[in-house]
Image: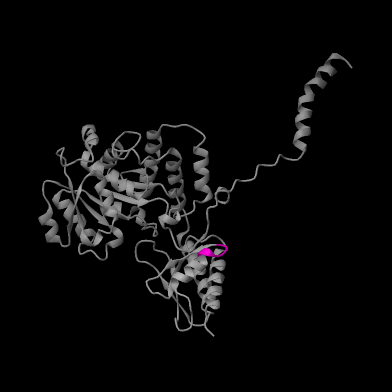
């Protein structure tokens, strides 16, 4: 062997070693750690809906991947909010947007931005707006005051209740900071969207709307921006399937900038409402995915799940069903299942407990009627509609008299 052959042979050795290793079996990945099982936490099939106490929705792979990838690098929080906010604003046809720590946080920050504007000194004075000379009152329709309006009071404002246009006009004074509207209760309030907006514009008072769970339809993501509301607040972890701890505040550019001045990483009343870079990116990924869905196809899939459950449970003697579609919040098909109490020994509460305590555990919604439950299908995963149908039918069959 000459020198050239020897050098060639030595050079090939590492390559041969790598080749030999690569031809062998791939190293096995460690098993995925099941923290729920490890900690003894009950998991369940969600046939109830996107309730906060039930941890709302499950994030799809695209969102989980966005969170995982963005967790591997550092970035300035303001840069992340800037770039994501620009994209969200474009999607939702708003002047500007930001990711918040849920819809409640969006309302707190939006209210704070209205109060302080771009004045750092005022930011430091919240939650004492009245004592520091800021405006300090928010007008709310009495029919809209169901608890969520209390988010606004985190800034120190006082809620002023009205029922009519005349009452609203009489309530306005130099302390009035904004008019707050809860979309979910639009049908029960005397003053509707357009009139509310007209009053706000005529009086020179900013308007905020809460649309927390009001998607679908997808058009609601931009409907209220186009309608003219100054700020729009929405949850991120419901039908959008984003992080449950995220939400979106969108609207007028100057108000979003002021809200950002009150938001982390700066100090202020919302310092504890921090949203990390992973949640911000995850929220954007969820929104981007959602607007690209075939919504008609998704609705049809929900109807098919309803039909399967409906057909299965109606085989039980004395059972009746009714398809219910809420007109606004959680606007998806649900199934009310009721039964003749003379034929069935169960109450709705008792059926819910049996489903909860069974295997797999299932959560449904208790109904106003004592002998009924409601099943919501849009959080069901593949195949779970059949499991839910069979379990409900099984329990009702066992409880049927005679």
Pick the residue in front: 311 or 369: 369
Can residue 110 be seen from the camera position used here?
Answer: yes
The quadrant of the rendering that contains the N terminus is top right
Pick the residue in front: 50 or 227: 50
Q: Is residue 166 left or right of residue 308?
A: left
Location of residue 210 (image quadrant): bottom left
The image shows residue 272 at horizontal and vertical percentages of: 35, 40
Q: Magenta segment, principal secondary structure? A: loop
Identify which residue is drawn at 55% across, 49% down. Answer: 39
Identify which residue is drawn at 43% across, 76% down. Answer: 371
Extreme-top residue of the structure: 3
The image shows residue 2 at horizontal and vertical percentages of: 87, 15
Q: Is residue 391 magenta?
A: no
Can residue 336 be seen from the camera position used here?
Answer: no
In this picture, which residue range is highlighted in magenta?
A: 356-360
Q: Is residue 357 magenta?
A: yes
Identify which residue is drawn at 51% across, 51% down. Answer: 60
Q: Is residue 11 left or right of residue 243?
A: right
The image shows residue 392 at horizontal and vertical percentages of: 52, 71
Location of residue 126 (image quadrant): top left
**Relative to 231, residue 370 above or below:** below
Identify which residue is drawn at 39% across, 68% down. Answer: 325
The image shows residue 307 at horizontal and vertical percentages of: 51, 72
Q: Is residue 1 left or right of residue 7?
A: right
Q: Is residue 7 left or right of residue 100?
A: right
């Amino acid at each position: 062997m000459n020198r050239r052959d020897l050098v060639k042979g030595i050079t090939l050795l590492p390559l041969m070693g790598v080749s030999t290793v690569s031809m062998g079996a791939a190293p096995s990945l460690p098993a995925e750690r099941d923290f729920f099982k490890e900690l003894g936490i009950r998991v369940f099939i969600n046939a109830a809906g996107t309730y906060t106490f039930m941890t709302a929705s499950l994030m799809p792979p695209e969102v989980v991947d966005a969170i995982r990838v963005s967790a591997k690098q550092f970035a300035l929080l303001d840069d992340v909010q800037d770039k994501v906010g620009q994209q969200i604003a474009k999607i939702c046809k708003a002047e500007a947007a930001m990711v918040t720590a849920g819809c409640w946080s969006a309302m707190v920050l939006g209210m704070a931005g209205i109060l302080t504007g771009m004045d750092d000194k005022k930011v430091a004075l919240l939650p004492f707006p009245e004592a520091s000379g800021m405006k300090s009152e928010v007008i709310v329709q009495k029919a809209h005051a169901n608890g969520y309006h209390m988010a606004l009071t985190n800034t120190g404002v006082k809620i002023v209740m009205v029922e009519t246009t005349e009452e609203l006009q009489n309530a306005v004074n130099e302390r009035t900071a904004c008019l707050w509207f809860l979309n979910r209760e639009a049908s029960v309030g005397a003053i509707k969207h357009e009139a509310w907006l007209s009053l706000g514009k005529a009086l020179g008072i900013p308007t905020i709307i809460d649309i927390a769970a009001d998607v679908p339809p997808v058009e609601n993501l931009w409907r209220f921006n186009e309608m003219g509301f100054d700020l729009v607040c929405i949850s991120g972890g419901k039908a959008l399937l984003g992080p449950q701890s995220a939400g979106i505040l969108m609207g007028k550019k100057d108000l979003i900038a002021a809200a950002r001045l009150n938001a982390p990483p700066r100090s202020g009343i919302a310092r504890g409402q921090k949203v990390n870079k992973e949640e911000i990116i995850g929220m954007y990924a969820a929104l981007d995915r959602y607007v690209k869905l075939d919504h008609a196809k998704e609705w049809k899939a929900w109807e098919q799940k309803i039909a399967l459950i409906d057909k299965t449970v109606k085989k039980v003697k004395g059972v009746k069903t009714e398809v219910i579609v809420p007109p606004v919040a959680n606007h998806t098909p649900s199934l009310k299942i009721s039964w003749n109490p003379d034929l069935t020994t169960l109450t709705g509460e008792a059926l819910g407990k049996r489903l909860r305590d069974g295997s797999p555990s299932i959560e449904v919604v208790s109904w106003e009627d004592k002998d009924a439950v409601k099943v919501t299908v849009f959080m069901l995963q593949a195949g779970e509609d059949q499991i839910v149908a069979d379990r409900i039918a099984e329990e009702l069959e066992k409880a049927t008299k005679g």
